Every structure is written in C-alpha cells, then in structure tokens.
Amino acid sequence: MRNTFEQNISLFPMISIMICVMGVLIFFFSSSIILSLGLDKNTFYYFSKNNEDEKTPKFLEWNGKILIIHPSFDTLLLSEDMNKIKTWEETYNYIQNQIDNKDSYKTLFTELKNNNDSLFAYVFVRQGGFGSFRNVNGFIQHRIKVDLGYELILDNEKIKIK
C-alpha cells in the first residue's frame, strides 16, 4: 500500500506580500504627485492689526543678492559678497551706499526709522539668502534701529501679500 501526502499550497503569504508592496507603491506615487502639485502654488500672507497699538509691517524679500520691496517689487541689487567684507561697519556702509542710490529704498528706510513706534520691517528670506541674511538683519536692526521680523521661504515659492 502506498502512502501519499497531499500538500495544499497556500498562496496567502505571497498575496499579502504583494498587497503590502502595492500599498507602498501607491503611497509613494500619491505623495510625489501631491508634492509636485504644490511646489509652484502662490502663498498668500494676510496681515491685520488686532488693535491700534500694534505695529504695521513693511515687507521686504531677500534672496542673497537682491532686496525686494513688497508689494511694489522695487529691487536693490547688492552684488558684492557681503560675507567677505571684513567688518560689520564696512558691511553696513556698503548697504547704506546702495540704499542711498535708490530713492524708493531711501524713502522706505527713512520712514521706518522715523516711525519706529508704529512700523517694523518684515523680511521673507529665501533659502539662497539665508547665509548672508545676518548682514541685512544687522543693518536693519543696528544701523536703522528698527524692529525686524522674518520668515524663511522656499526659493520657488511665490509671495502674495494681502
């Protein structure tokens, strides 16, 4: 008499592994699609005063070489590498000389300095400008003597101020 074994082959482990792999792939593709859809979107910044005692912001943007006034988009090119200037005083003098050559910036910083109790500077700092932002920050806080707020933003982020 012959004794035979009948083995049943279960496909459950293989199917469960395939389902897990499919889940990971779906997660990967959906997250990459969501990230790619959101990169070029505009970011809206809404600023409102809760009471009359709060200061009003004057918006600037810094990318490492160019200082931009918002919402007028007046630009000021600071072409020299400020990190290579030896002293803070020389750095501040360089920035001041560039500002003195551009009327819109001269007007803005004079207004900030004269109305320090009701205005402050708010700077959007792009990733490429973070390394040299300390120079602009120091100039605004120590030379102009104005309160300063800042926010780090992505290089490809578009700013809309309302």
Image (cartoon, helix red, strand yellow):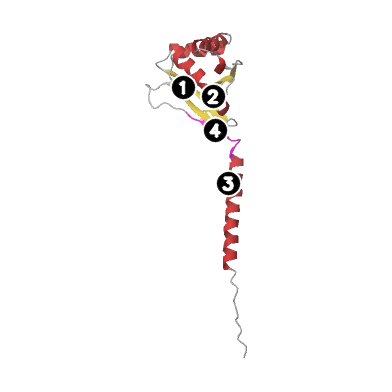
Count neighbours of disc 3 (C-alpha within 10 A) and say few if under 14, some if 14 to 19, many if 20 or more.
few
Which of 75 and 27 lies nearest the eye of the viewer? 27
Q: Which region of the structure is painted magenta? A: 38-46
Task: Inspect the magenta stretch and tell me whether residue 41 lies in it.
Answer: yes
Q: Residues within 10 Å of mark 1 (few under 14, many from 20)?
A: some
Q: Give SS at disc 3.
A: helix
Q: Which residue is mark 2?
A: 131
Q: Position of residue 113 (x, y in %)?
A: 45, 12
Query: On screen, 151 above or below 95?
Result: below
Q: Check disc 3 and give the amino acid type.
A: Ser
The Cα–Cα distance between marks 2 and 3, rounded to whole angstroms, is: 30 Å
Q: Earlier in the sequence, mark 1 or mark 4?
A: 4
Name the kind of residue labelled 4 in the image: Thr
Q: Earlier in the sequence, mark 3 or mark 4?
A: 3
Q: Considering only order in the chain, which callout, 3 or 2, is on the residue closer to the N terminus?
A: 3
Q: Which residue is mark 1?
A: 57
